[in-house]
Image (cartoon, grey):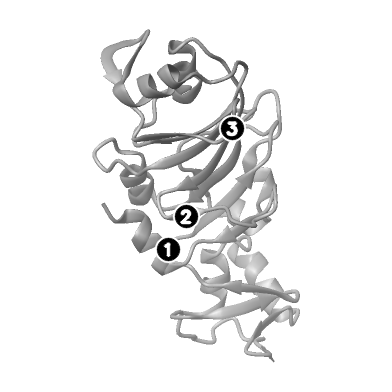
Amino acid sequence: MRISQVLFSQGFGTRRDCAGLIHAGAVEVAGRVVDDPDEELPTEDLVFSVQGRAWPFHDKALVLLHKPTHYECSQKPRHHPGVLSLLPTPLRVRGLQPVGRLDEDTTGALLLTDDGTLIHRLTSPKHHVPKVYEITAKHALADEQIARLTEGVVLDDDPQPVRAAAAERTGEFTLRLTLTEGKYHQVKRMLAAVGNRCEALHRSRIGALALDDLPVGQWRWVGPDERARLLQK
């Protein structure tokens, strides 16, 4: 692929913008300045740099973000900044979208991608991608409440009970809950259904992907092996 097309496909502006970066000597590959927009490069394992910042080529981008509070998972946020503002310009230009949503006051793991097929697969109820939430409740958690979360509770918009795949007490007021479906405000509504209230909510894991030590507000690439594990049933 021509280096000018590489930059364009990765979100570095219009074709004219990309050619301008190349002519200005701002693009390097393997420590060598590439100043010919028509130079052909293999894209497999390609890492180039633009204005000193290294950038791996991805035909389809997939990133993991540690979402802070007071950010909206919307491309047109209304009351708070959007999570896309936490990403560098090239990722925003190429059209990354959140895979599902976290409420404005919920923190934690959020995937973003420009792969529509992947978004459909990860959000489809058929695939049951497990998501792990760390919950702080308003009232001390009773054993009966925790048992009901795994046995099933009925929410006000659906007569079919919803169940947690796992519920583990982590403290008097804290709980780790694993869900394999994603209804609107599901965690908060499930906790309300057993007579408690969610005071704080954090998603620590999506499938095989954990936040680990990723700082709040920061993002990282999801590699091919991680992506494959994410899609495993």
Q: Residue at x 38, y 45 (%)?
A: 119
Residue 230 image-quadrant placement = bottom left
Q: CA distance from mark 1 to mark 2?
A: 7 Å
Q: Which mark is residue 226?
A: 1
Work out whether mark 1 precedes mark 3 in sequence or the reverse, and give the earlier one.
Answer: 3
User: Residue under circle 3?
Assistant: 171
Q: Which amino acid type is shown beneath numbered disc 2? A: Leu
Tell me if label 3 and label 2 are in contact, CB under 8 Å.
no
Relative side of 125 to 216, left or right: left
Q: Amino acid at mark 3?
A: Gly
Local crowd size for mark 1, using a 10 Å CA cut-off: few (<14), some (14–19), many (≥20): few
- Contact (CB < 8 A) between labels 1 and 2? yes
Few, some or many residues within 10 Å of mark 2 (<14, 14–19, 20+): some
Mark 3 or 2, closer to the camera = 3
Relative to 218, say whether 172 is above or below: above
Q: Residue at x 59, y 56 (%)?
A: 212
Instruction: Give the structural element (helix, strand or loop) at label 3.
Output: loop
Three-letter residue code for mark 1: Glu
Q: Nearer the viewer, residue 55 or 160?
A: 160
User: Which residue is nearer to you in this view: 136 or 185?
Assistant: 136
